Amino acid sequence: MMKIKFKISLLLLSVLCLTSCSKTDFHISLFIYNSSDTFMKGYSELLVSTLENNYKVSTYYAEGSQSYQNDQILNELYSEDNKLLLVNLVDRLAAKTIIEKATSLNKPLIFLNRQPLANDLKSGKNCYYIGAKPESDGQLQAEIINEYFISNENFINSDLDKNKNGLLDIILIKGEQGHQDTENRSRNAIDTLMKYGYQVNILNTSFCDWNRVQAEEYIAKIYDEYQNDIDLVISNNDDMALGVIDYLKKLSTYQKDVPLYESYFPIIGVDATSVGLEAIQNQEMYGTVKNDYEKQVEIITTLIPILINNGSMIDFPFTMDSPNCFQTSGIKISQKNYLNL
Ligand code: BGC
C-alpha cells in the first residue's frame, strides 16, 4: 500500500513539473566571443541571471576563435531542444553563414554587441541585432572633453595645452580592428572635437583589442617620446583607459593625492564598467560614456518570447534604429556628474 502511494505521488510530482516547469524547459544558448572581456562579463552575467528565471541557459565562450565558435553554434543549431541562439560573434563577417544555417533550420538568432553587416542581417528570418550606438558614444566623449577644456579658446590660452602649440594633442587608443564600435567611436569623437573648434593632432594611435594589459604595454612604449605633448587620451573603452592609468600610477612622478587628470591629462573611456566607475570615483579617469547593457538585456529578454512563440512585433515596445537593429544611447558620466547619478 505504502509503495503504491509513493509511486502515485511520484507520478503526480512529475506531471506537476511537466506543466509548471514547461517554461524553464525552453533551452537558449549564449555564445560569448571571449571570457576575459570585462564589459562582456558584466553583460553576460546580467543576461544569464535574468534569463534563468524563465529558460534553461547554456553559455559557451569562444576564446577569440571564430572557427571554435562556429562549431559551438552548429552543435546547438542542430539540437532539437534549443529554441533560440544569442550570439556575440568573434568576427562580424562570420554572421552570414550562421544566419543562412539558422534560417534554413527555422531558428531565431539574436546578435549582441558585435554587429553583423546590414545585408547579412536582412537576409535572415527572425534575426536581430542589439548593441550600443557607437556614433553617439564618440560624440558624447567629445562633449565630456569639451566640458573639461570649456572651449578651444580656453584650452589654447591655458596650461591645459601642455606644449603650447595651439593643437589638441591626442593619444587615441582603439579597440579591435573591424569592430563597429572601434571606427565609429573614434571618428565621431574626433569629428565632434573639430566641430567644437579644436585643432586636433593625433600624436599616436594603436589598436589594443579592448584589453587593459595591451593598452598599458602600448602607453609604456610611447610615453617617453610624447610625455610633454599629451593633452588628452581618448580610449574606445574603459578597460584600455585603465591600462593607461595603471601605467601612470607606476611612474615616480605619480602623486596619490592629486587627481590623475590634473597631474597628467584627462583620460576618457566608454562603458561605465564597475572598474571604470571606480576609477572615476578615485579621480583617475576623467569620464566615460555608459554602454547601457542593462537596457540591452531588457530589449533582448522582451524579444525572446516573441521570437520563440512566433509572435508579432507590432506591440514591441522598443523602436528599431535600422532594419532589425536596436541600439541603446550612451550616457555621459564624468567628474562633473557622477556623484549625482
Ligand atoms: C565595449 C568593449 C568590449 C567590446 C566587445 C564594446 O562595445 O565597449 O568594452 O570589449 O564591445 O565586443
Image (cartoon, rainbow, N blue to C red):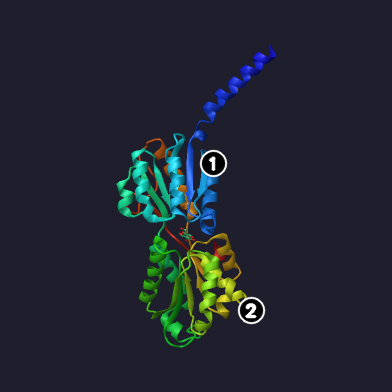
**Dots 2, 1 in contact, CB < 8 A:** no
Q: Nearer the viewer, residue 195 or 128?
A: 128
Kindly identify the residue that appears in the image at 64 percent across and 81 percent down: 252
Mark 1 CB in 8 Å range of ligand 1? no
Tell me if mark 2 has few (under 14), some (14-19) or many (20+) residues whose alpha carbon lies within 10 angstroms of its own.
few
Residue farthest to the top, as pictured: 1
Identify the element where label 2 is drawn: loop
Vertical comparison of 152 with 312: above or below = below
Vertical comparison of 163 with 98: above or below = below
Report the disc number at residue 38.
Answer: none
Q: Amino acid at mark 2?
A: Gln
**Which comes before the other along the chain, label 2 or label 1?**
1
Identify the element where label 1 is drawn: loop
Residue on which disc 2 sits: 255
Q: Nearer the viewer, residue 326 or 22?
A: 22
Q: Nearer the viewer, residue 289 or 93?
A: 93
Kindly identify the residue that appears in the image at 43 percent across and 67 percent down: 140
Residue 215 percent across, percent down from the top left: 52, 70
- Quadrant the C terminus occupies: bottom right
**What is the CA distance from the residue labelled 2 to the residue labelled 1?**
46 Å
Report the disc number at residue 52.
Answer: 1
- Quadrant the N terminus occupies: top right
